[in-house]
Amino acid sequence: MNDDVTFGMLLTDDPDLVERVSSFWPSQEFVWTIHRQGGSALEGLLNNPPGLLLISLTLPDYSGLEILSLLKAENVYRNVPVLLCLTEEECYRSFHPEKDEADDFFVLPGNDEEFRHRINLVAQRAKRTLDLNPLSRLPGNTSIIRNIQRRLDCKDDFAMCYCDLDYFKSFNDKYGFIRGDEVLLMTARIILNIARMLSPKDFFVGHVGGDDFVFVLPTPLAKTACRQVIAAFDSIVPQFYDEKDRDRGYIVSEDRRGEMRQFPFMTISIAVVPNYKGKLEHVGQVSFIASNLKKKAKESAHSCYVIDKRCA
């Protein structure tokens, strides 16, 4: 398990299963809430959704499949990962994987090590999926923070590059969110492809949200990566504008005060924070430096990157 506590719910009236699952991890790694009836479990699920739900099929009131169906029918709660605990007979007679929306299942009694691994895999897969940006499918804030902090703890020589699109809001307001999403996907692909090409074994790309992205590479590759990202972005982005806007080189859209004004084509600003000689210790430091550098980069009328002076 990773170093975060996972909060799970076990819904079963089988005391042996409760004892078995509870023994797999120490309490500082996995905390289980036990329910023996579906009614009480539903209240707990809706009020405080767990990170993982294990369900027995046979319960005193509801069936496990009824609980599963009720949970997955709710858009807010359907992302809770569910692992069904089945007897061999239930697996063949009651469970229908093509329509029952379980995330995984385990046939009891089975092997303890396999059971533990199966629970762990479902929990970790769910965490990764929930952290993915729904548009770009790139890792989100939690993964970004963990990746950078891990590198800081290891005193790695790396550069965190924070990318922000300029004039994206005016573009989105004029052309609509669908074309805006296409620009974000294009930007994600550019960053991902360049980072992977330059450092195939040591790169990370994340999507902070909106028009903000992060990529991490070894420090010596940062300048090259930024130049290539800027060149690719600047060459492709005009294609997203209508021909008449391309011809005149700007768009007319509302500003933040609701007034119509001219806006230039989108550009990309990149703030580069190198962990020079392993001096940085916390991701908060990286974020603070990047925020100040980004303001400096945005002063330019063109796409540009700004590197923290310790890189010199």
Image (tube, helix red, strand yellow):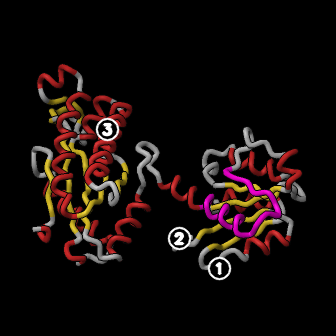
Q: Quadrant of the C terminus?
A: bottom left
x and y percentages locating residue 181 in the rendered image: 36, 37
Q: Which residue is mark 2?
A: 2
Q: Is residue 81 left or right of residue 63?
A: left
Crowding around mark 2 (Cα neighbors within 10 Å: few <14, some 14 to 19, many 20+) is few
- Magenta residues, start to end: 103-123
Name the residue: 51% across, 56% down. 128
Q: Which residue is mark 3?
A: 186
Q: Which of the labelled discs sits on residue 26, or is there none?
A: 1
Q: Is residue 86 left or right of residue 158?
A: right
Q: CA distance from mark 3 to mark 2?
A: 32 Å
Asked if residue 120 lies in the magenta stretch, the reply is yes
x and y percentages locating residue 26 in the rendered image: 65, 79
Dot 3 amino acid type: Met
Dot 2 amino acid type: Asn
Crowding around mark 3 (Cα neighbors within 10 Å: few <14, some 14 to 19, many 20+) is some
